[in-house]
Image (cartoon, rainbow, N blue to C red):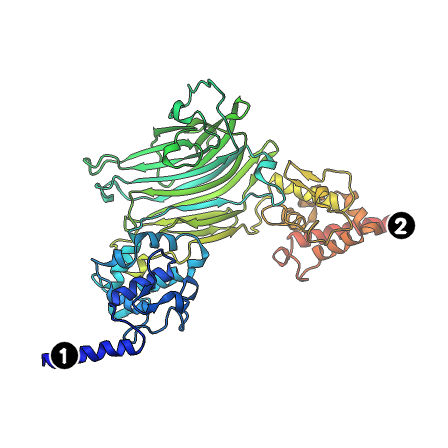
Amino acid sequence: MNIRLAFLAIVSLASFSNYGYSAVLPTDVAKAYVQAITNGTGSKVAGSIDYVALGCTAATVYDEQKCQKIVFNGKDGKTLLMESITASNIASLIPIGDVRRIYGNDPQYANVRELFFLLSTKNSGWYSGLEGEDKAKAILQRHLESSGPGGMYGNFIWPFDASSPQKAKVTSTGVDFLIVSLPSAAALDVNKSPLYYWALQTDFSNMAYPLGFDFAGVSGIDPNRCKNTKVAWGHVGLQYAKNNPSLPNSVQKQANWGGGGDGSGIGDYGCGGSDVTKLNWKVGTWYEYRVKRAVRRAPKLWEWVGEIYKKGDAAPIYSKTIFGGEYVTYATTWAELINVSCTSPRLITQWANPWMGNAGGKFRVGRVNLENGADGCLRSKEIISNKCQAKWTQYQGAISPATHAAANLLRKTNSSDMQEGYCERVPDATEIAIAKAYIQAISGGTGAKRVSTAIDFTALGCNADTVFDDGKCQAPVFNGKDGKTVLMEAITSVSDGNWHSSNIQSIIPFETINRILTDPKYALAKELFGYFSMQNDGWYDYLDGPGKPKDVMFQYITAVNAANALKTK
């Protein structure tokens, strides 16, 4: 019997040799396969199996002639990987550094992330025989999640398309924030001392501390370490900390406004200043975070105030100062969960109504890029909740109990873009000003064709002759919308069917619309107004209907034409 087994082994090895494969272990092939699809630095060769030569990369994960090619004992690389996984070898099969790289936001790894989701998720239809708490799919899921939650971000996209934040001289920004639900003190892991932090972060333009600067008045700065700081940023927000493991049911609620220096990491934190203050904030209460420029202290140095308000209140419940440059150059919200595991109890938070401002006013941010950090924690997710308010919801943690279950997994993509939608919201002052400036531009009016320091229709080349030019009058100017869209959405609807109840005449004065309708020089604008006022013509169909903006425009044009007809009698 032993002689027969030895003979079969020799024949088996000979057969591998005949097919060009040397005697390798399945785990060797699995490791090479993982390095190939994750673009790792380890070997992509196992014996005679060369994944580079096969053309197996992150882009060819599903190619049957490349990554899915049968290579060993009638099996492809992913099958060998799944059949090789044990709790003791998973870290060597799929190094955690490779996990973090593929779960970053690099689109080249999108197929790899999808593959790992299918390989690790219960009831995905893949490798169902390997499901169960101590089997390969659950082990893989736990390993992917061991990278920890990498943060959730809401990156503000500057609302003025034709201008940068620096050119527009942004000096303030803000956003609303709500904690919907929160793990109890008893539910938190006392051994990890977790910190939940939800912040609005702002980057500032270049700064400089003058020689001999007196740092008194702002806490957290080490003058010797920070005196040469040139670039600064700050983050303000609420924190939830369990910083005393010896007290199982003890947590601390607090707020922070802190800033860093030149971007070197934790070593430069506090070079703008830093404060942590106990603050008894409440779950279920809307707050507003604000950052605004204050006093100028030197040629390239300004005080910046970070504030937290209970929504609707006139006075802040938290207000502290740090240092920065002259303007805000970037803003984002984030949830960073330090010493928190993917399977910690579920929490839910919301953000809404982001804005930025300068000396000319306060401007709504209608576009936000939602982004998850580099992690394999699929139990965290950001979703768009309300496009009218630019509201998004964050979920983090596991539904109890935290088991190997598809219901516990949320995220399938690391990034999405939110674009505000029309919702018959009352137009704000910025939208009204843009609509008026656009009308003046296409009608040859004498009124302002510029809004603040951010939109200039004259500089865009928008006039009566370029009404339909995509690079001029039809160029995006505000939250991805062109002038005519801002105009139509700024016209208020009427409930009584009477156009006089709308704001249309304040946006388009009688003499302006009359000029468009009667002077041949404005023929293109007249054509455009025809599209604006005709029902069911494929233009702005969402503004069609009795009393809505297109009907209001039709009534207004009809009234102007009737008035002109009376004059000619």
Lateral position of residue 72 relative to residue 564, left or right: left
Mark 1 lies on a secondary structure that is: helix
Foreground mark, 1 or 2, reads 1
The answer to which of 280 and 55 lies nearer the viewer is: 55
- Looking at numbered disc 1 in the image, what kind of residue is underneath it? Leu
* Residue 272 vertical position relative to residue 408 in the rendered view, above or below: above
Residue 496, can we see it?
Answer: no
Q: On the image, which quarter does residue 40 sit in?
A: bottom left
Residue tagged 1:
5
At a point 76% along the width and 47% down the height, the residue shown is 463
Lateral position of residue 440 relative to residue 302, left or right: right
Mark 1–mark 2 distance (CA, rounded to whole Å): 111 Å
At a point 32% along the width and 75% down the height, the residue shown is 20
* Residue 365 vertical position relative to residue 86 in the rendered view, above or below: above
* Residue 381 vertical position relative to residue 430 in the rendered view, above or below: below
Characterize the local packing of mark 1: few (<14), some (14-19) or many (20 or more) Cα atoms within 10 angstroms. Answer: few
Q: Return the mark for residue 568.
A: 2
Q: Position of residue 192 (x, y in %)?
A: 24, 41
Lateral position of residue 444 relative to residue 124, left or right: right
Residue 307, can we see it?
Answer: yes
Q: On the image, which quarter does residue 427 sit in?
A: top right
* Residue 515 vertical position relative to residue 135 in the rendered view, above or below: above
The quarter of the image holding the N terminus is bottom left
Q: Position of residue 74 (x, y in %)?
A: 29, 76
The answer to which of 279 and 304 lies nearer the viewer is: 304
The answer to which of 229 and 414 lies nearer the viewer is: 229
Mark 2 lies on a secondary structure that is: loop
Q: Position of residue 215 (x, y in %)?
A: 43, 20
